[in-house]
């Protein structure tokens, strides 16, 4: 492929980005504008034209899946020698080489999940925490390291950032310090340490910096709006005093500030590099003009200063207008969404091209039930990883064995089907649902991948397929499984579907209850923007006025829908309550119930969830029962717990200060 051939099919802005192969380059790429296409063609054009030696280019992104996608596209464009990795994978690879020089020995073990270390550190400090609080504390330590805070500077950093966590900041700082000591005692490091150590090594050892910089001379950073101060520090160490850096991002899609990300590096790029080439990609090839118009309208009140004028322009043919729907309760909302999914599938839309997106993972269960009731297969994104599934492990083992005796006259898809037949998989025996259907769909995804590979490379054989699976497994770049996707808005970032249902759009859910500062509220708006721009054609937005049937309908639609939804959408109606309270008061009551539960759990020396689960407390706050009989109707309040805790719970519901409610003595 010639250099000019690489440019074929690019629009004017993508072409300008591809031809800017040297010096500082900033590509402001709106959702659906083909940013991956632009950066892969830029790299390939530079390689084919001789401007970029492939071995000296490092492309960095944020997920293993995205890195795998970059490598696949670059191989197809004839630039297979380019390295495409996540920040952590790149740092790990470099440290494995430099560890003897900078650490005096091999690289310590990298802990995949620091939860146990955090739990042990909390126990040493005698902090009383339940499992969910420990997860929050582990995430808080991760945030602190991402923003380059240390135990002694954490309190100030947390106050400045408006961090919302139930544990006092001083206690978090002590836990942070004890966690670092626990790692040193165990001789392990975490993922943030990989970046800290590698950046520090290049800052301290001139020979290490020189060797890395001679190896990599050209850098490309995808999703630059999500770079943390720690990642920027490592990038600066890689770059040195050079300026061959291309960054790509969209400040309207900054949704990871809670993890330390900041769009300031993207928005300030032109100030740092005054001679930078800036290219704006604004042609949206993903979504219909109707979806694009809604997305533009959502962010219009909060146009990011450094990105003014980046309004998307839909390039697809017109489609249906986005729909807005209000329901009495969550089961009714879920049943409606499930029936629409069923109708779309019956009309020919593949199940894998439909997604139901929500703010928090706890919203998934009611949709799992509703989809099962209408016989629609689904996949919960964020569950077990594709290549870790038992059937996929077994299939890869059999395929690897079959590849050793590959028959040249058998087409790749047929060879794959033959191997999977030994596992009991056949194209016409799909189970109706449950785990058996999930297993069938996983194996079917391998067959679909074989078809895709042959379409791109007709000469591909079984050994090529096995090699592709090994590459994807290393990057966790899974093939598509047929099933409606259930995912949080954060997990949906970077993905797209023909039909998207955005559900549960009420205030205190989106924006989430604990978002209180202007910056936090703005990020919640961007989260809805990300959800809207996942849809290619069909987009439905909905909300429910109550959690369960028969409960007070006191919720209101998300404030972000004001001015977007039709003016005729009915307002929340409450028939039973004379003076309905807003949902925010439910959230305040939930907080008081949690405070009572924590005190009760400490008195019993048991985890808080043993008293009542969060789901049960939420149901109690929603229903506000006034007596034992009403409390007994709440799911999760059995006879034993009713006898044990009815009196204190009813006191809290009546307005008592939870700190003044005496814990129940349990023998």
Image (cartoon, grey):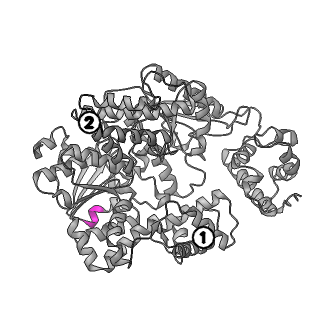
Question: Which quadrant is home to the N terminus?
Answer: top left
Point out the stretch of residues depicted in magenta.
269-273
As helix, strand or loop, the secondary structure at mark 2 comes to loop
Occupied quadrant, residue 236: bottom left
Exactly how many numbered labels are in the figure?
Answer: 2
Give the percent coordinates (x, y) of residue 8: 15, 39
Which label was assigned to residue 172?
1
Give the percent coordinates (x, y) of residue 628: 87, 42
Give the percent coordinates (x, y) of residue 388: 47, 46
Residue ID at (45%, 28%): 425
**Residue 343 in sight from this viewpoint:** yes
Horizontal side of residue 284 vs 262, given as left or right: left
Crowd around label 1: few <14 · some 14–19 · many ≥20 (10 Å): many
Q: Earlier in the sequence, mark 2 or mark 1?
A: 1
Occupied quadrant, residue 213: bottom left
Horizontal side of residue 378 vs 310, given as left or right: right
Give the percent coordinates (x, y) of residue 260: 46, 62
Horizontal side of residue 397 vs 72, given as left or right: right
Residue ID at (68%, 59%): 130
Inter-mark Cα distance, 2 to 1 = 55 Å
The residue carrying mark 2 is 461
Crowd around label 2: few <14 · some 14–19 · many ≥20 (10 Å): many
Q: Nearer the viewer, residue 151 or 83?
A: 83
Horizontal side of residue 494 vs 649, given as left or right: left
């Amino acid at each position: 492929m010639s250099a000019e051939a690489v440019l074929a099919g690019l629009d004017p802005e993508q072409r300008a980005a591809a031809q800017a192969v040297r010096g500082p380059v900033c590509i402001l790429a709106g959702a659906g504008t083909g940013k991956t296409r632009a950066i892969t063609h830029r790299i390939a054009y530079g390689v084919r034209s001789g401007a970029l030696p492939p071995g000296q280019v490092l492309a960095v992104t944020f997920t293993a899946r995205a890195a795998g996608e970059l490598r696949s596209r670059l191989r197809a464009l004839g630039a297979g020698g380019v390295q495409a990795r996540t920040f952590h994978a790149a740092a790990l690879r470099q440290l494995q080489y430099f560890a003897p020089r900078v650490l005096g020995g091999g690289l310590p073990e990298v802990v995949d999940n620091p939860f146990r270390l955090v739990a042990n550190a909390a126990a040493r400090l005698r902090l009383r925490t339940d499992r969910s609080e420990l997860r929050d504390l582990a995430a808080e330590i991760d945030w602190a390291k991402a923003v380059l805070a240390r135990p002694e500077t954490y309190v100030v950093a947390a106050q400045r950032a408006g961090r919302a966590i139930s544990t006092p900041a001083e206690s978090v700082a002590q836990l942070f310090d004890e966690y670092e000591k626990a790692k040193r005692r165990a001789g392990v490091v975490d993922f943030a340490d990989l970046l800290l150590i590698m950046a520090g090594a290049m800052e301290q050892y001139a020979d290490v910096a020189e060797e890395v910089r001679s190896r990599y001379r050209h850098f490309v950073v995808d999703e630059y709006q999500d770079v943390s101060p720690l990642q920027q520090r490592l990038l600066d160490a890689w770059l040195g005093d050079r300026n061959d850096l291309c960054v790509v991002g969209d400040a309207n899609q900054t949704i990871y500030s809670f993890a330390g990300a900041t769009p300031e590096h993207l928005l300030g790029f032109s100030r740092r590099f005054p001679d930078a080439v800036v290219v704006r990609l604004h042609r949206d090839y993903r979504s219909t003009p109707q979806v694009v118009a809604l997305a533009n309208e959502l962010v219009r009140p909060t146009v990011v200063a450094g990105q003014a004028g980046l309004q998307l322009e839909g390039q697809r043919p017109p489609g249906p207008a986005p729909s807005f729907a209000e329901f009495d309760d969550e089961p009714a909302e879920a049943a409606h969404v499930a029936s629409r999914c069923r109708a779309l599938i019956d009309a020919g839309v593949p199940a894998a091209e439909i997604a139901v997106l929500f703010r928090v993972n706890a919203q998934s269960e009611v949709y799992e039930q509703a989809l099962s009731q209408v016989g629609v297969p689904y996949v919960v994104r964020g569950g077990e990883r594709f290549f870790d599934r038992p059937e996929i492990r077994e299939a890869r083992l059999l395929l690897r064995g079959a590849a050793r005796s590959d028959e040249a006259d058998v087409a790749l898809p047929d060879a794959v089907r033959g191997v999977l037949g030994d596992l009991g998989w056949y194209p016409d025996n799909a189970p109706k649902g449950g785990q058996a259907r999930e297993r069938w769909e996983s194996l079917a995804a391998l067959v679909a991948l074989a078809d895709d590979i042959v379409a791109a490379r007709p000469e591909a054989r079984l050994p090529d397929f096995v090699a592709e699976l090994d590459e994807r497994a290393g990057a966790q770049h899974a093939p598509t499984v047929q099933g409606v996707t259930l995912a949080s808005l954060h997990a949906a970032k970077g993905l797209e579907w023909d039909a998207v249902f955005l559900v549960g759009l009420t205030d205190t859910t989106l924006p989430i209850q604990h978002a209180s500062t202007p910056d936090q509220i703005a990020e919640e708006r961007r989260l809805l923007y990300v959800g809207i721009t996942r849809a290619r054609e069909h987009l439905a937005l909905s909300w429910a006025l109550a959690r369960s049937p028969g409960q007070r309908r006191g919720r209101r639609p998300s404030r972000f829908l004001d001015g977007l939804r039709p003016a005729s959408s009915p307002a929340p109606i409450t028939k039973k309550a004379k003076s309905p309270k807003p949902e925010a008061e439910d959230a305040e009551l939930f907080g008081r119930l949690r405070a009572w539960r924590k005190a009760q759990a400490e008195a019993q020396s048991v985890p808080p969830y043993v008293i009542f689960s969060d789901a049960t407390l939420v149901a109690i706050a929603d229903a506000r029962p006034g007596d034992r009989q009403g409390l007994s109707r709440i799911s999760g309040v059995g006879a034993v717990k009713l006898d044990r805790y009815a009196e204190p719970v009813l006191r809290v519901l009546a307005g008592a200060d939870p700190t003044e409610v005496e814990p129940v003595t349990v023998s």
